[in-house]
Image (cartoon, rainbow, N blue to C red):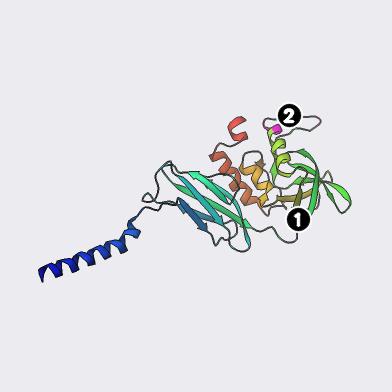
Amino acid sequence: MGITVACTIAIIAATVLFILEPWEQTPSAKAYTLVAVASPLGAGYVSVSDSEYDPGDQVTLTANPADGYTFDHWGGDASGTSATIVVTMDSDKDITAYFQEVPPSSTVEARVTRVVDGDTIDVYMDGVVHRVRYIGIDTPETVHPSEPVECFGKEASAKNSQLVGGKTVRLEKDVSETDQYGRLLRYVWVGDIFVNDYLVRQGYAYASTYPPDVKYADQFAEAQTEAIANNRGLWATCE
């Protein structure tokens, strides 16, 4: 009888251990998916706990924007504008994924025929070539007839060319149609990248907003704060 009871207890104990063991195991797949129900300009915060990963681990993070929003960029220990990114975790293991509203349907498409400098392009639209000046930002000067090439101007022009050169972009108007030089004033998207924001956030441009075109003024100010805090681009190079 004693042997039977002992065997029964042993079987029960083994069963309990079998059930509990999966909950106690460290995950073998180093992946974390951020599912964000984001508000406009919303941010989804990812914190990978110490019990799961150690500093130096390679962790795959995926951002999934809610309907009506698009993935913008990673912050914290991540970088780039890809929705999926492999991160080497540091001691903090904190990541922020930023989201923005899908560009409004009122935007129009145009093909970039020339990149003039870091914040100005020529586009072909409705059978006509238009010059477009990016709203809310200012890149260092490179083509002004009476001013020298400014620090980080060539890098800004090169990055703008990389982003939009020869591509189809989406243009969004704010309040003003043109500036004093007759250039169209527009916000510019290429794919999921908000070009005006990207150039400021990555340190290629300054936030420079003039009323009445202020729709994204707060966003550009936040982007510049992030660029300065992370010593990006011109903030690391120019005095």
Residue 239 location, x and y as percent? 61, 29
| Chief SS of the magenta region | loop
Q: Amino acid at mark 2?
A: Val
Marks 2 and 1, how far apart at CA: 31 Å
Residue that extends furthest to the bottom in the rendered view of this protein: 1
Q: Residue at x 61, y 64 (%)?
A: 67
Q: Residue at x 35, y 59 (%)?
A: 22
SS at circle 1:
loop
When asked about the image quadrant of residue 36, the answer is bottom right
Q: Which residues are magenta?
A: 145-154
User: Which residue bears the numbered disc 2?
Assistant: 149
For label 2, the SS is loop
Number of residue marks: 2
Q: Which quadrant would residue 204 be assigned to in this image?
A: top right
Horizontal and vertical percent for residue 177? 80, 53
Determine if the magenta segment contains residue 52.
Answer: no
Find disc 1 in the rendering and name its residue: 175
**Looking at this rendering, what residue extends furthest in the left direction?**
2
In the image: residue 135, left or right of residue 26: right
> Which amino acid type corresponds to the residue marked 1 in the rendered image?
Val
Can you give x and y, in whole percent of width and height, for residue 203 in the image? 62, 39
Q: Nearer the viewer, residue 232 or 49?
A: 49
Packing grade of label 1 (10 A; few <14, some 14-19, many >=20) is few
Residue at x 59%, y 45% (from the top left corner):
80
Query: Does 39 sit above or below residue 197?
Result: below
Q: Position of residue 218 (x, y in %)?
A: 62, 51
**Residue depicted at x 64% and y 43%:** 200
In the rendered image, the quadrant that contains the N terminus is bottom left
Taking depth in this image into account, of 10 and 231 the one nearest to the observer is 10
